[in-house]
């Protein structure tokens, strides 16, 4: 039986991580769109990786469970890379919460029941989660531990409360890091680890949508006033993920790694700070 790396979201970040951790393993690529997953599979196959593909809708338990069944049918789940999601420009608040928040909780729950001893997971969150003001202890606990099927019923997530797509995105990404912290306890009982990475503006089609959309000027200002002064690359995210999923990261679990070129630092303590 092969060791399997499951990549959910076959975009540039998912591919970059797979290139770093998928050598000698079977890479199962899953995406909502068949054309996306086939294009990614060709790139990885041409580079010498053993790849198979399937489609998945992370907002559907049946679909995520089918992905788990496909993966375990190939071999032991050595790694899970969850890089699927929608941005504030791409979707309404309800959809963002269902895909980015509920969908992540589903993935963590389903794969946390089958992850192999010594296995590791990565969830791609976002710097946006770090720009949300502090939540209460009760709200943090609710996002981290509410049963998956009850998550979207939380009062703090109702349509009359969350009316802005950016706020929905920030809540989802903060929720992702909190959820991973709680799930790390359960994954740990299987001898496995899970962490989040919160990237800043990374050069992907999603980021290009944001830069071309109504928030584009704000994104460009973030880049200009950050310490790095540039956009990030998928390979830089891949390097952090390789640390977290590899032998040098075995003491790291339940953690969130912010890598945004200094945007969040500038937001709270620099020139990007709200007036």
Image (cartoon, grey):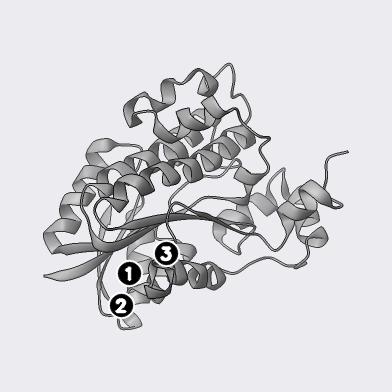
Label 1 or label 3, whichever comes before in sequence order: 1
Residue 104 position, x and y percent, is: 40, 43
Q: Please give left or right for residue 104 compared with residue 97 in the image.
A: left
As drawn, the label of residue 28 is none
Q: Residue at x 56, y 35 (%)?
A: 171
Q: Residue at x 30, y 58 (%)?
A: 192
Q: Residue at x 52, y 32 (%)?
A: 140
For the residues bearing labels 2 and 3, Cβ distance under 8 angstroms: no
- Number of labels in the image equals 3
Q: Secondary structure at mark 2?
A: helix
Q: CA distance from mark 1 to mark 3?
A: 32 Å
Residue 259 position, x and y percent, is: 62, 61
Residue at image mark 1: 41
Q: Please give left or right for residue 141 compared with residue 194 in the image.
A: right
User: Residue 21, relative to residue 211: is it above or below?
Assistant: below
Could you classify mark 2 by the number of other residues whose Cα lies within 10 Å: few (under 14), some (14-19), or many (20 or more)? some
Q: CA distance from mark 2 to mark 3?
A: 32 Å
Label 2 or label 3, whichever comes before in sequence order: 2
User: Residue 1, relative to residue 133: is it above or below?
Assistant: below
Q: Secondary structure at mark 3?
A: loop
Question: Could you say which quadrant of the image residue 249 lies in?
Answer: bottom left
For the residues bearing labels 1 and 2, Cβ distance under 8 angstroms: yes
- Please tell me whether mark 2 or mark 3 is closer to you in this view: 3
Residue at image mark 3: 251
User: Residue 117, relative to residue 89: is it above or below?
Assistant: below
């Amino acid at each position: 039986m092969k060791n399997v790396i499951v990549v959910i979201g076959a975009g540039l970040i998912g591919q970059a991580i797979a290139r770093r951790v998928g050598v000698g393993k079977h890479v199962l690529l899953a995406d909502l769109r068949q054309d996306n997953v086939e294009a990614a599979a060709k790139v990885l196959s041409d580079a010498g990786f053993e790849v198979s593909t399937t489609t998945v809708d992370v907002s559907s338990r049946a679909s995520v469970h089918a992905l788990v069944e496909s993966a375990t049918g190939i071999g032991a789940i050595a790694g899970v890379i969850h890089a699927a999601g929608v941005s504030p420009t791409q979707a309404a608040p309800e959809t963002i919460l269902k895909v980015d928040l509920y969908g992540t909780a589903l993935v963590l729950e389903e794969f946390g029941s089958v992850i192999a001893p010594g296995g590791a997971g990565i969830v791609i969150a976002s710097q946006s989660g770090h720009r949300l003001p502090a939540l209460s202890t009760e709200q943090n606990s609710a996002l981290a531990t509410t049963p998956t099927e009850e998550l979207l019923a939380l009062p703090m997530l109702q349509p009359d409360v969350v009316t802005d797509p950016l706020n929905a995105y920030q809540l989802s990404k903060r929720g992702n890091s909190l959820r991973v912290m709680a799930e790390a306890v359960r994954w740990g009982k299987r001898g496995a680890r899970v962490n989040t990475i919160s990237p800043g503006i990374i050069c992907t089609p999603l980021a290009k949508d944001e830069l071309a959309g109504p928030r584009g000027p704000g994104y460009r200002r973030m880049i200009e006033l950050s310490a790095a002064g540039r956009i990030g690359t998928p390979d830089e995210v891949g390097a952090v993920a390789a640390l977290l999923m590899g032998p040098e990261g075995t003491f790291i679990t339940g953690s969130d790694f912010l890598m945004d070129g200094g945007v969040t630092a500038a937001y709270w303590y620099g020139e990007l700070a709200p007036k």
